[in-house]
Image (cartoon, grey):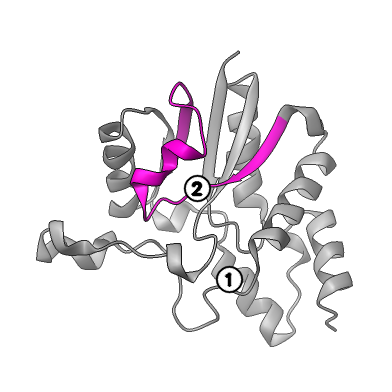
Amino acid sequence: MKIGVAQGRFHIVHFGHMEYLLECCKRCDYLLIGISDMDPSCAYFDYSDILEQDKKEMKPFRSFEDPIYPFTFFERMQMLKLALLEHNIKASFFDIVPFPIHKPWLIKYYIPKSSNIFVTIYDKWGEYKVKLLQELGFAVQVLWKRSMQERFTTGTEVRKRLLKGEDFQDLVPRSVYKFLKEFYPFD
């Protein structure tokens, strides 16, 4: 069986995530979805081995202005399950696991070494992630390389709209919107 791995923070599952996940589904027999930054203790690298000039560009893309960890691992797992089922991906096709990208020596405890990790690149962090995973001995397949301006949206944008009371239904699957409305009433 060809096992694929998709990886991300998924702090509000949006249509950009779905484009990535659905493409991953096409390329494997079984998909593991790794949620990184499972909690704040697993969120940052010790950047000591990275050149000073690259450190600013290496930070994972996120906004520090809004809550960095607004959703628990469990809530993100629920959003992923609901969104995949909504897109007709059978529950037996995927599982969701922790993916400690900032403690990379632990990744081998969560996914099989024979997995093919699917990556998208939008910045230097994405490029670094490919190199890091390859150095750990994983097969890495880059699905696409795009600029930040070519991204569909970001979790930061969705969260900003949510916090401001602005409509964000056009950015997330219906099931995610319904989940958020049920567990975090807004309007």
Reply yes or no: does residue 82 show up in magenta.
no
Task: Give the answer, above or below, for where 125 lies relative to 28.
Answer: below
Q: How many residues crowd around disc 2 within 10 Å: few (fewer than 14), some, or many (20 or more)?
A: many
Relative placement, left or right, of 121 versus 74 is left
Residue visible at 72% across and 62% down in the picture:
75
Residue visible at 62% across and 41% down in the picture:
19
Residue visible at 10% across and 59% down in the picture:
51
Element class at badge 1: helix
Relative placement, left or right, of 32 versus 123 is right
Q: In which quarter of the image is the N terminus?
A: top right
- Which picture quadrant has residue 159? bottom right
Residue holding disc 1: 157
Element class at badge 2: loop
Q: How many residues crowd around disc 1 within 10 Å: few (fewer than 14), some, or many (20 or more)?
A: some
Residues at marks 1 and 2, CA–CA distance in whole angstroms: 23 Å
Task: Give the answer, above or below, for where 112 lies relative to 126.
Answer: above
Residue holding disc 2: 99
